Image: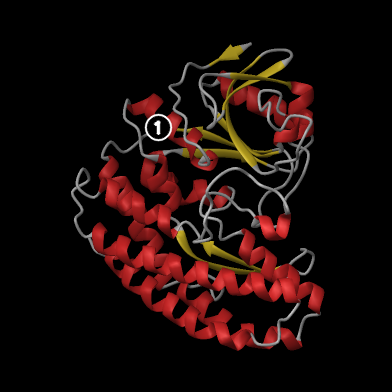
Amino acid sequence: MKRLELPHQMADYLCPVNGLCDVYEWKTGSRIPEELIFYAKAGFQMISQKRADAPKMIFLGQSSIGKREYEFWKEIIGYEIISGEGKCFRTAWSEICELLDQEIPTILFGLDMFYLPYQQKFYQKQHIPGHVVLMVGYDDENAYIHDNSKEGVQAVPALDLEQAWAKSYIGISKKNTYFGINMKSPKEDISWIVQKGMAKNAEMYLHSTLSFVGQRGLDKFMKEFPKWKDVFAQEALRKIYLHFIEYTGSVLPELPYEISGRQSGITNPHRASRDKLAQALITYKDSFGVPEWEDAAYWFDSSGQIIQTIVEGFLEDVRNMSFGNSEKYIPSFQKLREYEEHAFHIMLQD
């Protein structure tokens, strides 16, 4: 049996970074605001994946999924990652217990809430895949975790955890994926950490070496998009559009009620978190001493409104199964490019 005593704060809908912030606070006594490091990863990616439901997957974030999230911050914050994925449950469990014995808390990636007993709203009722928690202890029968939506420590029977963790996600993670966070030499200046990360993200967006990421990726997309109606069947186009819509949810990936028929009960505008990033920049600009963030917030908020307008058009096209006039969206994407170029140039400044 092993239990690490870490601080924990709730951070609704920010599960990928909540555990990372817990570990940082454990080692430094200070906390990095989750919303700053999570929403800081605005950008663009176009992933081509023949085996996926949507053969073209558009994400309006960059390097922010799975391992890439933790790799992005490790040098800036000051930690090492010990990771594993795709192994059998027994092996992954054994390796994580060894990490905990070495005082290394471990992020468990890609859980389905259907199998988490403390998630009473979803347990054995609704599949909510892709959840992320921080494992801080174990005994012969249970894992002990921090969950961003719950106070304190939660117990999860190992049998439930095995089922929750059994699915792979194409292009994101394999089953039984974990990331041990060894916070060996954390930087103490949180303002420096956040600004350094945002500048790195801006550099990736403005000067990406990859043709499918950042401004280059957006340019490639705008060149390709009008041709897709002649390349893909109607059903494939529908799935491409639906994927875009789903992953522009500002709070979490979600299809609107008129498509899904489900109400999540949260306010979730489809602005690709630009509204959330703008809000975080305004909230912290004075305490972090970065007045320029106000201008960046304006441009990000404006680009979020453009994204929402595009989504409204995509929804209408899906309802009508009409994908023949995709050229009409190019001026909006060009305006989005212009606004975000302004914003990222501000974030790039020292």
Q: Nearer the viewer, residue 89 or 346?
A: 346
Residue at point 73% right, 81% down? Answer: 322
Horizontal and vertical percent for residue 113? 70, 35
Image coordinates of residue 155 in percent, x first then y, are 65, 18
Q: Total number of numbered labels?
A: 1
Q: Is residue 148 visible?
A: yes
Is 60 on the left-hand or right-hand side of 30?
A: right
Above-or-below relation of 219 to 315 = below
User: Residue drawn 74% across and 76% down?
Assistant: 320
Q: How is the image coloured?
A: secondary structure
Q: Nearer the viewer, residue 318 or 119?
A: 318
Residue 166's image quarter? top right
Q: In which quarter of the image is residue 185?
A: top left
Horizontal and vertical percent position of residue 54: 74, 67
Crowding around mark 1 (Cα neighbors within 10 Å: few <14, some 14 to 19, many 20+) is many
Q: Position of residue 309 (x, y in %)?
A: 51, 71
In the picture, the quarter occupied by the N terminus is top right
Picture residue at 55% right of the left edge, 82% below the top? 329
Location of residue 337 with respect to 181 vertically, above or below: below
Locate the C terminus by quadrant.
bottom left
In this rendering, position of residue 187 left or right of residue 47: left
Task: Name the residue tied to disc 1.
Answer: 24
Q: Determine the secondary structure under disc 1.
A: helix
What is the three-letter code of the residue carrying label 1?
A: Tyr
For image coordinates 43% across by 34% down, the residue present is: 21
Using the rendered image of the protein, determine whether residue 75 is visible from the camera's viewpoint: no
Q: In this view, does 252 lie to the left or right of 260?
A: left
